[in-house]
Image (tube, grey):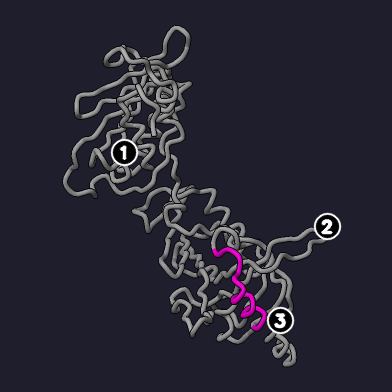
Amino acid sequence: MIGRRGFGLLTAGAALSVVGAVGSLRADRGTGRVPAAAGPLLPGLVDRLDRVASVTVARPRGEVSLARAGKGWTVASRHGYPADDARVAGLLDSLARLTRETALTARPELWPRLGLGEPGTPRPEREGSVERENEPGTRVTLRDATGTVLADVILGPAAPPRPTPDGGRGPALYARLVAGERAWRAGGAVDLPRAALDWLDRRLVDLPAARLDRLTVEGTDGAAVTLARGPDGTLAPATPLPGGAPADPRAVSLLADAFEALDLADVRPAGDGGPDAALVAVARATAAEGLAVEARQTGAADDPAGRWCRFIVETAPEASPAARSEAEALRRRLDAWTYRLPAHRARRLATTDLTGDPA
């Protein structure tokens, strides 16, 4: 919800400004020009959702562009990488479900006090110890394949919860149409991530330890370690560790899970990284069905957060049809990209020492 995840609770100063803006509606009412507070905020949008070809989300600190690609979505402003389709669908659905609850001020100078200023307007200024509110909102623009605007709205922070027919409290927010004449208190909630990366489909690979027959990590310093499934069904070091040292169970478990629920931290096109950096480590997981995924990390050995990773997906000759199908889907997703991994996962995929509890 935009109030919880996007803007947070209104500050005390902003709350006072909102009271002033809402209070000014009384003057509007006196003119007899207050529109009925009923129906959808974006009339007709629910019937046009299948025509939406692009979405632009403009915030004060940047803009995210989403584009429809076949049955899914891509983040055009992130090199066209696949988007989280469920998140985009949720955004469109929540916009179509917004309803007009209360007609608010028609005075543009008061809109920023409701968090409905244009995203490009200046940030709040301070006069002594008092902050003068000039809060920009988030502008969401929907267009069809020809570029025709289907919806253009500025969303502000959460409004006080609204009573529902069953005696509960429903979500509400402040909003206004870009081409509209006034602000509204709208019923509903809209989930708008703050960061561009949060629009991406972050999942890369998901190979839990239970699927693996073997996992090998080789460092460029010559160190290597291999986990193999033993007679007891568990993954354990395939050969004795240096000096006969015992393996730490937690270190083994973390390495065995290195390819499980692996997400990206950043992404760029495969050919967009300049000169090839030094290879740091190669980790290879082989599943029982004949699927193999190799992660090749490049960068600085002492900077896991700064490394980039390429994936190679292969299948054994005896691989099952399901494994071949999974491999093809992984290649379509991974082959054209280079990824930055979360630092703790990058370290795990370069682990060759299983004798101590990892940090």
In the rendered image, the vertical position of residue 253 relative to residue 301, given as above or below? above
Label 3: few (<14), some or many (≥20) within 10 Å? few
Identify the magenta region: 7-20
Which image quarter: residue 299? top left
- Cα gap from disc 1 to disc 2, whole angstroms: 52 Å
Which is closer to the viewer, label 3 or label 2?
Answer: 2
Which one is nearer the viewer's eye here, 61 or 96? 61
Q: Which of 125 and 214 is in front in this view?
A: 125
Helix, strand or loop for disc 2: loop
**Mark 2, residue position:** 166
Query: Is the residue 146 above or below the residue 320 in the image?
Result: below
Tell me, yes or no, whether the two marked residues, 3 and 2, touch with CB atoms within 8 Å: no
Q: Quadrant of the C terminus?
A: top left
Indicate whether residue 164 is drawn in magenta.
Answer: no
Mark drawn on residue 40: none
Q: Where does label 3 land, which residue?
A: 35
The kind of residue tagged 1 is Asp
Point out which mark residue 335 bears: 1
Choose top left, top right, bottom left or bottom right for residue 105: bottom right
Quick one: label 3 or label 2, which is nearer the N terminus? 3
**Residue depicted at 52% across the width and 54% down the height:** 88
Q: Position of residue 287 (x, y in %)?
A: 41, 21
Callout 1 crowding tier (Cα within 10 Å): few <14, some 14–19, many ≥20: some
| Residue 306 image position (x, y, % from top left) | 29, 46
Q: Is residue 248 left or right of 45 when viewed as pictured?
A: left
State the SS at label 1.
Answer: loop
Front label number (1 vs 2): 2
